[in-house]
Image (tube, helix red, strand yellow):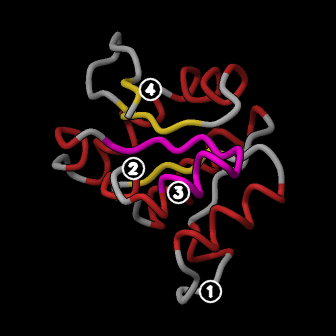
């Protein structure tokens, strides 16, 4: 997701003790997806929100996510097509559900729906 969205979300959800980071603000841009998920797995209970749903389909990335203990949430294509402010609004609207996914799932790959009442789809 764009760094702009991550930074804006951080300002809002930090009021509840959560943190949101743009990965490029915390890791070198040269880090591979597999290395990233291994690092995040060692660092604690992370949720990664991404537009790159292809990670869920590529065997090395999929295996790295599932073995890392990271919950990966990918924007549904309908969400990805929205302008950045509407993507941020969708993520923010789903924030409680995102937190519950982290609390109830040891790991996993999920699709973030566009509709407010929709469930996360497991990938």
Read off the residue under disc 4: 93
Give the x, y percent position of residue 38. Answer: 70, 64
The residue positioned 60% from the left and 25% from the top of the image is: 101
Circles 3 and 4 in contact, beta carbons < 8 Å:
no
Cα separation between marks 4 and 1: 30 Å
Magenta segment: does it hold 49? no
Residue at image coords 31%, 27%: 113
Q: Are marks 3 and 1 in contact (CB under 8 Å)?
A: no
Q: Which residue matches tag 2?
A: 56
Which is more N-terminal, label 3 or label 2? 3
Quadrant of image for the N terminus: bottom left
Which class describes the residues within 10 Å of circle 3: few (<14), some (14-19), or many (20+)? some
Give above or below for 22 relative to 94: below
Question: Are dots 4 and 1 in contact, CB under 8 Å?
Answer: no
Q: Considering depth in this image, is 121 or 16 the residue closer to the camera?
A: 121
Callout 2: 10 Å neighbours few (<14), some, many (20+)?
Answer: many
- Quick check: is 64 in the magenta stretch? yes
Please report whichever mark, 3 or 1, sits nearer to the chain's N-terminal start. Answer: 3
The number of discs equals: 4
Observer-nearest residue: 41 or 21? 41
**SS at mark 3 in the image:** helix
Q: Which circle's residue, 1 or 2, is located before the other in the chain?
A: 1
Q: Residue tagged by mark 1?
A: 28
Q: Position of residue 23 (x, y in %)?
A: 58, 68
Name the residue rendered at 39%, 44% in the picture: 74
Q: Which quadrant is home to the C terminus?
A: top left
Mark closer to the observer (1, 2): 2
| Labels 4 and 1: the sequence-earlier one | 1
Please, what secondary structure does the residue beneath circle 2 have? helix
Q: Is residue 108 above or below residue 58?
A: above
């Amino acid at each position: 997701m764009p760094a702009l969205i991550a930074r804006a979300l951080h300002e809002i959800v930090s009021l509840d003790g959560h943190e949101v980071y743009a990965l490029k603000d915390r890791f070198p841009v040269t880090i591979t997806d597999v290395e990233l998920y291994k690092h995040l797995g060692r660092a604690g209970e992370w949720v990664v929100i991404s537009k790159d749903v292809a990670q869920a389909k590529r065997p090395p990335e999929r295996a790295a996510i599932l073995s890392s203990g990271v919950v990966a949430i990918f924007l549904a294509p309908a969400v990805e097509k929205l302008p950045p402010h509407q993507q941020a609004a969708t993520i923010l609207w789903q924030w409680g559900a995102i937190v519950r996914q982290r609390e109830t799932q040891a790991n996993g790959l999920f699709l973030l729906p566009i509709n407010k009442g929709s469930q996360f789809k497991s990938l």
